[in-house]
Amino acid sequence: MTAPELVGYLAAVLTTVSFVPQVWHTWRTRDVAGISMGMYAVFAVGVFLWLVYGLLLGAWPIVVANGITLALALAILAMKLKWGRSP
């Protein structure tokens, strides 16, 4: 593995894993007050486009990392929709 590949894999792992604590915290507390619907929606679209880009290139590290990140971002959006509404 070359140095650029190693850096790319490490970046992919860290940026993907960085969403796990937010998903876990939100799931556990059901507190979505601090979650920006707009930010996560735009972010999810951007990650989806990175996923498509990876698919078009056949770059599986990009596909896997962005597929997982998209799932986590969509989970946060779903929780915001479910628990963020006023009674």
Image (cartoon, rainbow, N blue to C red):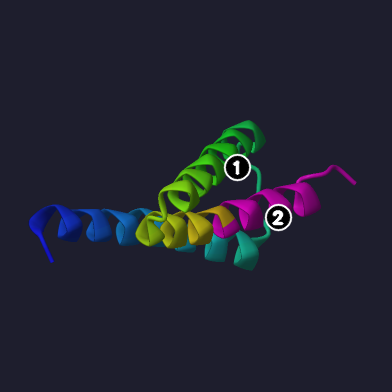
Q: Is residue 1 above or below residue 85?
A: below
Q: Amino acid at mark 2?
A: Met
Say if residue 21 shows up in the picture: no
- For disc 2, the marked residue is 79
Q: Secondary structure at mark 2?
A: helix
Camera-nearest residue between 41 and 8: 8
Tell me whether circle 2 and circle 1 mark residues in contact (CB < 8 Å): yes
Pick the residue in front: 84 or 4. Answer: 4
User: Circle 1 sits on which residue?
Assistant: 35
Q: Quadrant of residue 48?
A: top right
State which quarter of the image contains the N terminus.
Answer: bottom left
**Magenta extent:** 71-87
Residue 16, given in percent of the width and then of the height, sits at: 41, 58
Q: Which three-letter amino acid code belongs to the residue tagged 1?
A: Ile
Do we see residue 75 in this rendering?
A: yes
Residue at left 59%, top 38%?
A: 45
- The answer to whether residue 37 is above or below residue 60 is above
Which residue is drawn at the image coordinates 63% and 31% (left, top)? 38
Which residue shows up at 64% across the image and 58% down it?
A: 75
Left or right for 36, reference 51? right
Residue 77 % position (x, y): 67, 48
